Image (cartoon, rainbow, N blue to C red):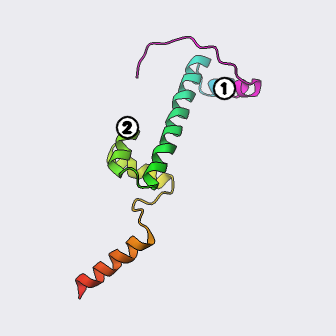
Amino acid sequence: MDKEKIVVKPFIYKNLWEKIESYAQRHDEDIDTALGKLLVKGLFEETKKRILENYQRRRIALREMAELLGVDYWEAQDILSEEGIPLINLSQEEIKKRIKDINKDRS
């Protein structure tokens, strides 16, 4: 992550600012540090949401999902589990075909 800092002056609703201040106090951090951490976390969660949607729609594979999230293969599986997303995402037709193939192999 680039460590160069810039000054920004966002307009924030008062009730949101109060929540940020409360977060900073609870975590014993100054406002700048707390706000930076919250932004990073929020961006990660938004990115994760988009990546998980692409995984569920079969646009990307598990290894690609892991790479995009910056985690290893096993952590990606943990994320899927935490989000309640099945590791194997097969359609009903694919499941029926696989069962048929298994039964054919047993014959």
For the residue pair 19 and 92, the one nearer the viewer reads as 92
User: Mark 1 or 2 closer to N-term?
Assistant: 1
In the rendered image, residue 7 lying in the magenta stretch gets the answer yes
Which stretch is magenta? 1-20
Please, what is the three-letter code of the amino acid marked with disc 2? Gly
Residue 20 marker: 1
Label 2's element? Answer: loop
Give the number of marks.
2
Question: Residue 12, position in %: x, y?
Answer: 70, 22
Residue at 51% over, 57% down: 84
Please, what is the three-letter code of the amino acid marked with disc 1? Ile
In the rendered image, residue 31 lying in the magenta stretch gets the answer no
What residue is pinned by disc 2? 70
Residue at 54% over, 23% down: 36
**Is the stretch drawn in magenta largely helix, strand or loop?**
loop
For the residue pair 27 and 71, the one nearer the viewer reads as 71
Question: Residue 42, position in %: x, y?
Answer: 55, 34
Q: Quadrant of the C terminus?
A: bottom left
